[in-house]
């Protein structure tokens, strides 16, 4: 267990250093971002990109919550996650549920970083954007 933790930490340091070596640590400014501007709400200035990202995240969460709690497939996924043997005894194909969850994690892991990297590139540089993308994928894919 301890070796796995050290290996994960070492891989994170390696990926960060490799990204900085390949793309450099210089900042990249996006000339014309897709969204820009601020909205004032009760004296608070909220950035439009952050507001749109928050709304998109909440919509994705609501959709996933509905899918897991209201559909037959979602309930089967939930049952498989809670007790694989009991779900199998109830007639749920647990191997198929594991395949579906793995298949769903890939698109989720690759779609979100593409959107957030644009904002990261403008504020933290290209290597930080790549690192954010790889770290998010590792989290989603369980690494």
Image (cartoon, rainbow, N blue to C red):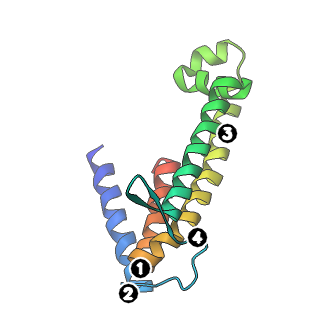
Task: Look at the numbered discs 4 and 2 and tell me whether their residues touch, using CB distance below 8 Å.
Answer: no
Q: Which residue is mark 2?
A: 26
Foreground tag (3 vs 1): 1
Real-space Cα separation, disc 1 to disc 4, in angstroms: 18 Å
Q: Nearer the viewer, residue 115 or 19?
A: 115
Q: Which residue is mark 1?
A: 125
Which of the marked residues, 3 or 1, is nearer the chain's N terminus?
A: 3
Q: Secondary structure at mark 1?
A: loop
CA gap between label 2 and label 1 equals 6 Å
Separation of disc 3 and disc 4 at Cα? 36 Å
Residue holding disc 4: 35
Disc 4 to disc 2, how far (Cα)? 23 Å
Q: Where does the image place residue 59, in percent across and percent down from the top left?
A: 61, 44
118 shown above or below 139: below
Category of crowding for the residue at label 4, using alpha-carbon neighbours closer than 10 angstroms: few (below 14), some (14–19), many (at least 20): few
Q: Are marks 2 and 1 in contact (CB under 8 Å)?
A: yes
Give the percent coordinates (x, y) of residue 109. 57, 54
């Amino acid at each position: 267990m301890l070796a796995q933790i050290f290996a994960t930490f070492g891989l994170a340091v390696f990926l960060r250093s490799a990204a900085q070596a390949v793309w450099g640590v210089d900042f990249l400014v996006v000339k014309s971002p897709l969204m820009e501007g601020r909205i004032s709400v009760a004296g608070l200035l909220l950035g439009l990109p952050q507001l749109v990202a928050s709304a998109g995240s909440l919509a994705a969460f609501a959709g996933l919550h509905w899918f897991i709690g209201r559909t037959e497939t979602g309930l089967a996924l939930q049952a498989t996650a809670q007790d694989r043997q009991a779900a199998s005894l109830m007639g749920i194909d647990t191997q198929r549920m594991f395949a579906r969850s793995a298949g769903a994690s890939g698109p989720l892991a690759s779609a979100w970083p593409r959107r957030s990297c644009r904002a990261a590139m403008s504020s933290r540089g290209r290597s930080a954007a790549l690192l954010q993308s790889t770290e998010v994928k590792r989290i989603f894919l369980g690494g």
